[in-house]
Image (spheres, helix red, strand yellow):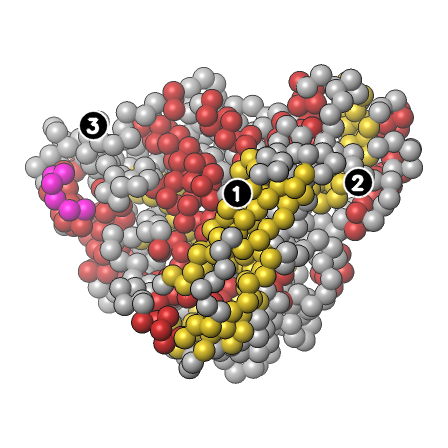
């Protein structure tokens, strides 16, 4: 968000005061001025209750309450309310969230960044994490220290490894994100649509995945995206949010094909509300912070400030995270640029959501009894450690791991070895504790020789090297823990390289000559080209541990010692370092083309260092189809005939493939989890064809040596479909292959016969004027091709 510097400042001080216009709290529906209004009538439906409230507002009061910091209406006893609350991986510092300096409500459970949680491929566990986050959020809210809506999750796909905010997402694959976010929203909002724990917000809608590459600031960037790529890649996770009945969306800073997303009625109305039918609960859209102002400058999309706020409000942006709405809507209304009914609609949407959280229902409302006792419970602590360990990925192992011997001296080297706040990164609250790898090793009884060594991506000197060599020479085993962190990848800051620094590789290389067993743990949200480490025969093991949260050190050593067997999978492709010289971040195309080797595992035509979904185990597994198909030839007409009750034909079931997964043991004979991944391949639909596409997955738990479990890979007609050039989702005849895991260890072939059938007819965008002006431009090499007419922009 625009106020990333504010967030950094907030997280650096002991206590945070909410930026609100008055005292917060809950309306008094017993003795207050609203007691006899329908908004306090729990028997009425949320729409009627919110409408009754907004009907009491004067025009001035309506304008005043259109920003993210709403002053409320004191004469009505309606308290001030701050809409901006954050909870990406735990209740987080933000204008709506207060942390005390000590004692109760001075901390909240800090889970790993989503990139590591996504690597677990464990959706039921994600639901549990989200339930803890929202439960703690309600406890904060009950104490007057948070609101009831939280601007999470970030569900943009992570296609370019340089993106600074990729760590906030579960990964690069649209199906993975879509499946993950359904479980996440269910956990955040709870099972009852009329008694939600919190309101979740899916962001950033849409095609947002760049901060400031080469002078292309997110505030001015016009993402040129074909309808095919948009429907196939950039939007599935957002459609999944709608299917999960998410309470809110956030439109993004960028423009999409010439139109700033917060001023785009095609995106916010035609697609989101009409085509996807996101209307049942009067859900609302907020702008990203000051994205409404950005419509005027630097997008240069409108000619006046009044036209700017009217364009956003009319398009369907209901809340302005900022001050542009309250400041400029009065003049825009005076000029007749919008109707008061449009303003009322926006306010009704906002307060309908608060009705659904019990905001107007008094102390006996659902979840109002939660106190600080519900924060950082033993279950939450264990969950934070479990999800971190489940996500850690083993990329190389020549037999060093797991460490079974305890009377060892370990040299823990690297700027992450004694990490504290690094393990949280951005959008974080204060953690109850931060357990580093050094702490975890010492708790296990190892003697630890710690030396920091090179300071990550930002230290070009050898000043801190001298204590490394004696620490390593006197140790039995060397473990280097480093990589990247939020000093080089964060909101507002894209990475400029995807390689380990020369300083880190120099030290790692010298340590590897000591003749001692050595492991490297790669940290950070974005992948680094680890080929020099993977190809070094003197380095036995390589792990990726992401950004692991409050108990990250313990989770890392759970894997190192074998207390937990590794089963995580890389959620993104690890590209060679020269990938950044082959494609500009401004190129939004997925398919290979001029100055683009292709993006993600589906389309990349080079050789990945480690492909998407890579991950080794401490044991061996075999897979097989538990029950063969009754036929391998399917009629498209017959398949669709079974879908009569499905308004969205893409969700109509095709087949559940039972896959037997057997732990056959090995040198370590470890009980282990296994993530069964189902990829679909074949030459059907429009060329070019993706190499393969993830269509199903399930994590199986604690498979003992010699035993087997069954995963069910559930495919729908949408799993089989492709997207044509107009964005239509089509079921095509052809030869299909379902492949289990990256190595296709089990393959099921089948055919679809008959004529192609459209499953989803995509609404076509209108012709739009190009984004104006030559003042706000990116640096050399930033040109894009206009997807509507092929012009260079």
Q: Which residues are magenta?
A: 41-46
Disc sitting over residue 364 in the figure: 3
- Which of pointers 3 and 1 indicates the residue nearer the eye? 1
Q: Earlier in the sequence, mark 3 or mark 1?
A: 3
Majority SS type along the magenta span: loop
- Residue 775 in percent (x, y) is at 57, 68
Contact (Cβ within 8 Å) of mark 3 with mark 2 = no
**Which residue occupies 87% across, 31% down?**
516
- The x, y position of residue 50, in whole percent, is 18, 47
**In this view, 465 is above or below 219:** above
Classify mark 2: residues with Cα within 10 Å, few (<14), some (14-19) or many (20+): few
Residue at 71%, 53% in the rendered image: 610
Residue at left 63%, top 48%?
622
Left/right of residue 182 with respect to residue 515 in the rendered view: left
Q: Are marks 1 and 2 in contact (CB under 8 Å)?
A: no
Q: Residues within 10 Å of mark 3 (few under 14, many from 20)?
A: few
The percent coordinates of residue 91 (x first, y second) are 45, 34
Q: Quadrant of residue 641?
A: bottom left
Q: Nearer the viewer, residue 249 or 652?
A: 652
Q: Secondary structure at mark 1?
A: strand
The residue labelled by disc 2 is 398
Q: Quadrant of residue 655 in the image?
A: bottom left
| Residue 637 screen position, x and y as percent | 36, 76
Mark found first going from the N terminus, 3 or 2: 3
* Residue 346 - label: none
Task: Give the residue drawn at x 51%, y 76%.
Answer: 734
Q: Which residue is mark 1?
A: 709
Task: Say few, some or many: other residues with alpha carbon within 10 Å of mark 1 (under 14 / 14 to 19 / 20 or more).
Answer: some
Q: 495 or 385, which lies in front?
A: 385
Specify whether residue 443 is in view: yes
Q: Is residue 571 left or right of residue 256?
A: right
Q: Quick one: SS at disc 3?
A: loop
């Amino acid at each position: 968000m625009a106020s990333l510097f504010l967030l950094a400042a907030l997280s650096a001080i002991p206590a945070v005061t909410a930026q609100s216009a008055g005292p917060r709290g809950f309306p008094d529906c017993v003795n207050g001025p609203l007691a006899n209004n329908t908004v306090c009538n729990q028997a009425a439906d949320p729409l009627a209750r919110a409408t009754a409230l907004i009907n009491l507002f004067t025009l001035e009061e309506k304008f005043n309450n259109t920003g993210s910091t709403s002053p409320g209406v004191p004469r009505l006893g309606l308290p001030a309310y701050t809409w901006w609350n954050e909870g990406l991986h735990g209740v987080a510092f933000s204008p709506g969230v207060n942390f005390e300096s000590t004692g109760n409500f001075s901390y909240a459970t800090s889970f790993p960044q989503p990139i590591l949680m996504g690597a677990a491929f464990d959706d039921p566990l994600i639901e549990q994490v989200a339930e803890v986050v929202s439960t703690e959020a309600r406890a904060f809210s009950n104490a007057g220290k948070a609101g009831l809506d939280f601007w999470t999750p970030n569900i943009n796909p992570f296609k370019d490894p340089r993106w600074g905010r990729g760590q906030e997402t579960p990964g690069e694959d649209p199906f993975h994100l879509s499946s993950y976010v359904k479980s996440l929203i269910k956990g955040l909002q709870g099972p009852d649509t009329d008694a939600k724990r919190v309101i979740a917000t899916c962001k950033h809608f849409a095609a947002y995945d760049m901060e400031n590459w080469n002078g292309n600031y997110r505030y001015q960037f016009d993402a040129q995206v074909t309808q095919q790529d948009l429907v196939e890649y950039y939007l599935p996770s957002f459609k999944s949010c709608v299917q999960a009945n998410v309470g809110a969306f956030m439109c993004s800073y960028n423009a999409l094909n010439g139109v700033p997303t917060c001023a785009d009625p095609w995106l916010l109305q035609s697609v989101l509300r009409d085509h996807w039918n996101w209307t049942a609960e009067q859900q609302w859209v907020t702008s990203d912070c000051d994205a409404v102002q950005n419509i005027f400058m630097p997008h240069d999309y409108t000619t006046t400030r009044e036209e700017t706020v009217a364009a956003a409000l009319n398009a369907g942006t209901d809340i302005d995270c900022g001050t542009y709405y309250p400041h400029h809507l009065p003049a825009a209304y005076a000029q007749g640029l919008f109707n008061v009914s449009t303003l009322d609609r926006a306010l009704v949407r906002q307060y309908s959501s608060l009705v659904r959280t019990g905001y107007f229902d008094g102390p006996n409302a659902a979840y109002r009894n939660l106190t600080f006792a519900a924060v950082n419970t033993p279950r939450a602590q264990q969950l934070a450690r479990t999800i971190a360990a489940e996500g850690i990925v083993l990329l190389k192992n020549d037999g060093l791991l797991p460490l079974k011997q305890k009377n060892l001296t370990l040299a823990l080297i690297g700027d992450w070895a004694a990490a504290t706040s690094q393990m949280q990164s951005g959008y974080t609250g204060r953690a109850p504790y931060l357990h580093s790898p050094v702490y975890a090793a010492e708790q296990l009884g190892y003697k630890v020789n710690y030396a920091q060594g090179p300071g990550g991506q930002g230290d070009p000197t050898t000043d801190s090297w001298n204590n490394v060599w004696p620490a390593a020479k006197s140790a039995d085993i060397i473990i280097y823990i480093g990589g990247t962190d939020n000093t080089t990848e964060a909101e507002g800051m894209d990475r400029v390289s995807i390689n380990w620094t020369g300083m880190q590789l120099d030290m790692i290389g010298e340590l590897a000559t000591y003749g001692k067993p050595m492991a490297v743990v790669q940290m950070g949200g974005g992948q680094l080209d680890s080929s020099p480490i993977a190809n070094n025969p003197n380095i036995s093991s390589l792990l990726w541990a992401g950004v692991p949260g409050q108990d990250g050190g313990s989770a890392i050593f759970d894997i190192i010692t074998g207390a937990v067997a590794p089963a995580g999978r890389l959620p993104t492709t690890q590209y060679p370092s020269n990938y950044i010289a082959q494609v500009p971040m401004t190129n939004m195309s997925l398919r290979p083309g001029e100055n683009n080797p292709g993006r993600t595992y589906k389309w990349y035509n080079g050789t990945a260092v480690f492909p998407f979904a890579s991950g080794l185990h401490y044991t061996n597994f075999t897979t097989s189809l538990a029950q063969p198909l009754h036929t391998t030839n399917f009629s498209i007409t017959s398949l669709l005939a079974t879908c009569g009750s499905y308004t969205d034909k893409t969700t109509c079931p095709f087949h559940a493939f039972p896959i037997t997964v057997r732990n056959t043991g090995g040198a370590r004979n470890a009980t282990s989890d296994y993530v069964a991944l189902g990829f679909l391949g074949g030459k059907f639909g429009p060329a070019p064809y993706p190499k393969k596409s993830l269509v199903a997955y399930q994590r199986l738990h604690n498979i003992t040596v010699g035993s087997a479990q069954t995963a069910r890979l559930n495919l729908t007609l949408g799993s089989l479909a492709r997207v044509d050039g107009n964005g239509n989702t089509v079921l095509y005849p052809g030869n299909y292959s379902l492949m289990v895991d990256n190595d296709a260890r089990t393959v099921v072939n089948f055919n679809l016969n008959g004529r192609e059938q459209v499953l989803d007819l995509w609404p076509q965008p209108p012709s739009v004027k190009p984004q104006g002006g030559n003042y706000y431009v990116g640096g050399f090499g930033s040109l894009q091709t206009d997807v509507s007419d092929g012009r260079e922009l």
